[in-house]
Image (spheres, rainbow, N blue to C red):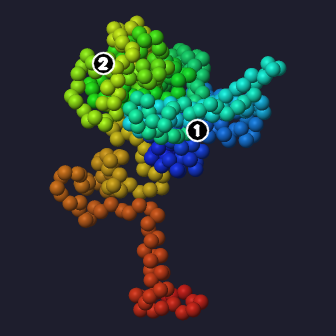
Amino acid sequence: MCTATDMAVLCGANGEVCYSKYGSFPTKGKYCHEMALRILLASIESHANRYKRYIVPVLSVFMDFYIRVFVRVFTSASEIKNTPLKLSYIYQCVGCDSFHLQCLARTVPKKNNGVKHAPAFGPVVPQECSDCGKKFNVGGPIWSAPIHDQDWVVSTLTGVKSMKDRYPAYDKITSVLTTVSEELDDIPLFFSLHNIAGTVKCTSPSLVMFRSAVLNAGYRISSTHVNPLGVKSDAPWDVIWDIMRCWVKNHPIKEQARDSPGTVILSKSPKLEADFSRAVAALGKSGAKKTKRFLPNPERHWGPKVRAGRKITSKHVSLLGPDAINAAVNGGGGGDCHREGSGAAPDSSNTAPEPEGLEDEPSNKRQKASGDGEPEGQKASDGEPASEA
């Protein structure tokens, strides 16, 4: 089991830091939290290969404000040769939400019924996006193989349901495992329905209608445990945009700028006539049974707390809430914490203490001043420390 909490690094806020720590360069997209899972798995696989070992992911989840992966580790010098087949680069369009994966390697059959590994053919995309005409950003490599063992997930979910009284967090466990069990495990990453609707500047179709259109076109589609509006599908992007073109034809929009990605996408005639009639499997098993998949936060101000070893100050009000700040700063007293919009300045008698790590700063400044200048009235002699009055 491996947990990572540096989500800002893994999700693309500091790409160079992510590359130095995990060996992958992230791209910015709505799928960033699943990409973080796949970057972590690729890093674990890379370290395991150095010792003739490889990993098989059992469960990989994004929960609350961290990611956690469960993997099995096996030893095989021959199996690690297949690692390049499990890694891919990402081509993310900067104009629309389309993305494409480029595998690192491919297999070539031998005469003796064996296979050898060769570099993959590429690139999988032209220089400009075929949908909107914009450029691509390149990221990776990431783990593009399945990130869950669906048999293990289903069996674990069954075992948890049979021992409901033993799990205080039963609702949380079952909601995550239920959503994971319905994911398409062979489809890396996902896209957001609201994002693609925002690209063409139209009102978003309901999730059931969009899923029905994809299913009626002959493709698979599922939800994802990472995002309630996330959609995984094996439908190519030209089919996805054809569905949106048909939707906009029935729900006209205002005229947009000529050079916007949405205008370029809608200027093309759809090759597929989308069918939005409700499909049988549009809801999914959990939707048909009305199973809760995404639970609300257990409390207000839920999220990462203050770093260990730091004193609580008024600047942490957005993390902990004003009540917790008052209790920490005033020792449970009734002092008022300055709130935004109140117009009242904080009381000087209840000023929050400075965080730890800054208490030694004044003494360092005094020593430096005593050695360089004469603010204390006495300069240190050669080889002797300055004495304080």
Point out residue 239 in the picture as x, y percentages from the top left corner. 42, 19
The residue at the far top in this view is 280
Give the quarter of the figure containing the C terminus.
bottom left
- Along the line of sight, the residue nearer the viewer: 215 or 331: 215
Point out residue 14 in the picture as x, y percentages from the top left corner. 48, 49
One can see residue 263 in this view: yes
Q: Name the residue at 58% across, 38% down.
A: 141
Q: Is residue 71 above or below residue 155?
A: below
Q: Name the residue at 36% across, 13% down.
A: 274
Question: Which residue is tagged 2?
Answer: 247
- Along the line of sight, the residue nearer the viewer: 222 or 306: 222
Residue 141 - label: 1
- Along the line of sight, the residue nearer the viewer: 68 or 88: 88
Q: Name the residue at 41% across, 61% down.
A: 355
- Along the line of sight, the residue nearer the viewer: 167 or 67: 67
Crowding at dot 2, Cα within 10 Å, few <14 / some 14-19 / many 20+, comes out as many
Q: Secondary structure at mark 2?
A: helix
Residue 251 sits in quarter: top left
Residue 69 sits in quarter: top right
Point out residue 360 in the picture as x, y percentages from the top left corner. 46, 70
Amino acid at dot 2? Trp
Amino acid at dot 1? Pro
